[in-house]
Image: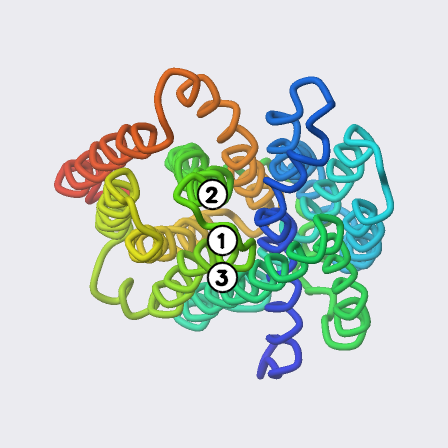
Amino acid sequence: MQNKSWKLKLTLLLVSSLTIMSVITISPALPQMAAAFSGVKNSSFLVKLVLTIPALMIALFSPITGRLIDRYGRLMILWFALVLYAVAGSAGYYLKDLYEILISRAVLGISVGMSMTIVITLIADYFEGIERQKFVGLQIAFMSLGGIIFLTLGGVLADYGWKYPFLIYLFSLAVLPLTISFLKEPVITEKVNKIIPQVKAPGIIWMLFINIMIMWIVFFLIPVQIPFHLKALGVEKNSLIGAAIATSTLLSAVSSFLYSRIRGKLGFLSIFSIGYLLMAIGFLCISLSESYLLDVVAMMIAGFGMGMMIPNTNMWVMKIAPPQIRGKEIGKLTTFWFLGQFLSPIVIFPVLNALSVSSTFMLASAFLFLMSIGFLIFHFSKMGKLVAQ
């Protein structure tokens, strides 16, 4: 894929934006949904699962997708995933039963597990070296900007009714014709099918998988808990809640866009250490905040830290995953990415039963600080210097 056109790049970026949109778009509508289904047993917990259950299905189906695309190619599966995305995503607008909505969200997760695994693999297929490093940062930045647009739009639509944000998922039908016109099946797919010897990725890749799961378990406190936190502070407009959460995504976009420059000066492990430190500071500010403005600033700091760590993980996995099993390894990366998002409310739920939301963010801040120190120590160790080359 020499001389990649702007049309190809834009198409990859648009497909990438569907990933973050799949989960957070309906976040501002959660309090309204909780009120609408208040008569359903355990509705408070189930409504939060509406936000995160796609992540479970993404986690389950990404490895399957990775193996399929290594064997049968990328694009046909991508086209199917985009149609399924529109159908399942918009179903929440029509459905009236909470459990039916949960099922539709699970199907949405299957489609995202396909599309995200494929788009990350295509980026690794199409780009190499510094060009790949720049595009990986651009991809995460574009995902974040897409998140801002869709999250803000979701907040505006939620002011008219909690069902309306589900219509945003029809956007995938606008992306579909672009993927048909501008994406080409990589030659690597044909080569991989002819390779017989068993190939394995370096063991350090499992540290990256587990780390990204931890990152999302903690960071997902923002879209899941901040709407309720801001309601408790007296913020009533869903559009303001959506805008507040979008600020973390905005700064995530900025740091992702700057990733190539950051990576040019810092190693993989150093970036993780700094990213976790910024998240720790942001979460500490949220725990101490009693105002909307301070919450916004805090989420900006946390978002900036998270934004540099996501492309850092993707880039490191792309670098060390052998081309013969690239789809398989990226499928695993996607699995742990979204497993973290799904597990977040489950892990945090018992903590919230024992502590307030503010105390939960304080505890998370302490944990993030320890993660930062851990990566700093790893960076200066002999093993750290060896694996991060």
Cα distance, mark 1 to mark 3? Answer: 17 Å
Q: Residue at x 18, y 43 (%)?
A: 379
Q: Secondary structure at mark 1?
A: helix
Q: Amino acid at mark 1?
A: Ile
Q: Residues within 10 Å of mark 2 (few under 14, many from 20)?
A: some
The circle on residue 241 is 1
Q: Pinpoint residue 147: horizontal percent, then vertical percent.
A: 55, 60
First of labels 2, 3 by sequence position: 3
Cα distance, mark 1 to mark 2? Answer: 8 Å
Q: Secondary structure at mark 2?
A: helix
- Mark in front: 1 vs 3: 1
Q: Residue at x 79, y 76 (%)?
A: 181
Question: Which is nearer the eye, 221 or 66?
Answer: 221
Q: Pinpoint residue 54: horizontal percent, then vertical percent.
A: 67, 39
Q: Which residue is mark 3?
A: 144
Q: Pinpoint residue 145: horizontal percent, then vertical percent.
A: 51, 67
Q: Residues within 10 Å of mark 3 (few under 14, many from 20)?
A: many
- Determine the image quadrant of residue 383: top left
Q: Secondary structure at mark 3?
A: helix
